[in-house]
Amino acid sequence: MDKTSAVPHVPSEPLPELAEFLKPFQALFRRRESQTAMERYLSGLLTEHPVKNCDTLADIVPGTTEQQLQGLLTQMIWDEAALNQQRVQIMRTLKTEGDGVLIIDDTGFAKQGQHSVGVARQYSGTLGKIANCQITVNCHYAERTVAWPVTTRLYLSKAWCADMARRQATQVPVAVTFQTKAEIGLHLIDQANAWGVRHACVVADAGYGDDPVFLNGLETRREHYVVAVRANFSVVSSRQTTAEVERVEAWLMRLPRWQWQTIRWREGSQGWLRAKFVGIRCWRVDGDGTRHVGWLIGQRLTRGAGEWKYFWSNFPLTTPLEKMVEYTHRRYWVEQFHEEAKSLLGWDQYQGRLWHGFHRHAALIMLTYSFLVWLELRERERISRRGRPRRAFSPSA
């Protein structure tokens, strides 16, 4: 049985809600052909077809061809950075609680060949091993009950940046030089700030939290942050140079149980998520011995033995521990985005090799995802339920 026969084909006319959402973006696409290709591409991404590349989408999306969809990603004239910026401006106008955080995280795309831009044998946390893959660093905006992507950037290894033949073959811009993932993350935060994305703090996993370049870069930008760190993260109890440097694991293990308190941070499908936490004011130590005051936060299970987690924050002394705990656990939003953008929208199925093709595909994925967020928020406002009034932004049923 043909795969496409079990999947509903896309309507010939644009979905009314999608057409309404895309109307402000039409000016970025100069020609009618590119406007149509963009709408048809997004309509294809929204289907339940299991494979989403230009070839398969052309089979189920009427009014377009594989050549037109490929041209949208590689040849037609439009600026993916301008599209991202305008999308962010629209998302910023949504009626929300306004207490968002910026999440920096990366994700990997497994690849078979060697010719796609940025592909290399490298460690991917998504895959959990060293594998042949591409890696992109992402910036995500997240409130307690709504989240959406801000921007993304492909990571290029030193070997890739130094290989002029591969750079030319994949059309990597001359201005793109080697940057660590932490440096890319800081660049994405600068971009979010330039676009006016207001936020309470920055959140990241231990891959960034253990990097002093990232933490010092945030502090230079006067950003508050709560980041995960590993067990060997170095802290001291005093700014004095004679104070003994310790691993956070050893320090927290010595604390008496009565100092830990139960904090719940989010209501899940099976009740409130909760754990035991403790916050200690101390100093982190850079590799050069420089010391920075902040909060060491420990997390352990409420009962029994289990994995301990560690966090570092530069929030002021008066900041409640509950607030920092809730902020750092918003990181699940970006993990959800990675999973849904790949499994539902085909983010990891781009088959092209070019730098701008990769980022154009990513921009259209983020546009599609933002449409779904926009649609859900609109439905929340429209649907009224019996009983006690729901909070304006409580999760939909």
Image (cartoon, grey):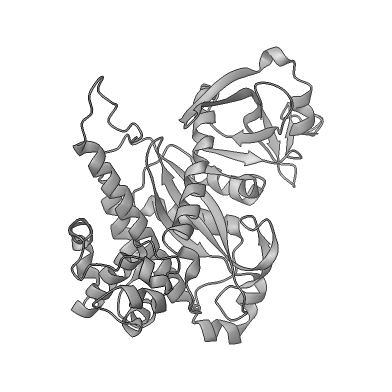
| Closer-to-camera residue (180/298) | 298
Residue 249 on image: x %, y %: 76, 32
| Closer-to-camera residue (346/144) | 346
* Number of numbered markers: 0
Residue beneath the point at 49% across and 46% down: 103
Quadrant holding the N terminus: bottom left
Residue beneath the point at 43% across and 37% down: 200
Residue 104 on image: x %, y %: 52, 50
Q: Quadrant of residue 248?
A: top right
Against 127, residue 296 (above or below) is above
Residue beneath the point at 62% across and 35% down: 312
Quadrant holding the C terminus: top left
| Closer-to-camera residue (329/13) | 13
Report the side of 167 relative to 102 (left or right). right
Report the side of 191 relative to 232 (left or right). left
Against 250, residue 318 (above or below) is above
**Which residue is at the far top?**
258
Is residue 319 visible in the rendered image? The answer is no
Q: Quadrant of residue 311?
A: top right
Residue 243 on image: x %, y %: 80, 29
Q: Quadrant of residue 158?
A: bottom right
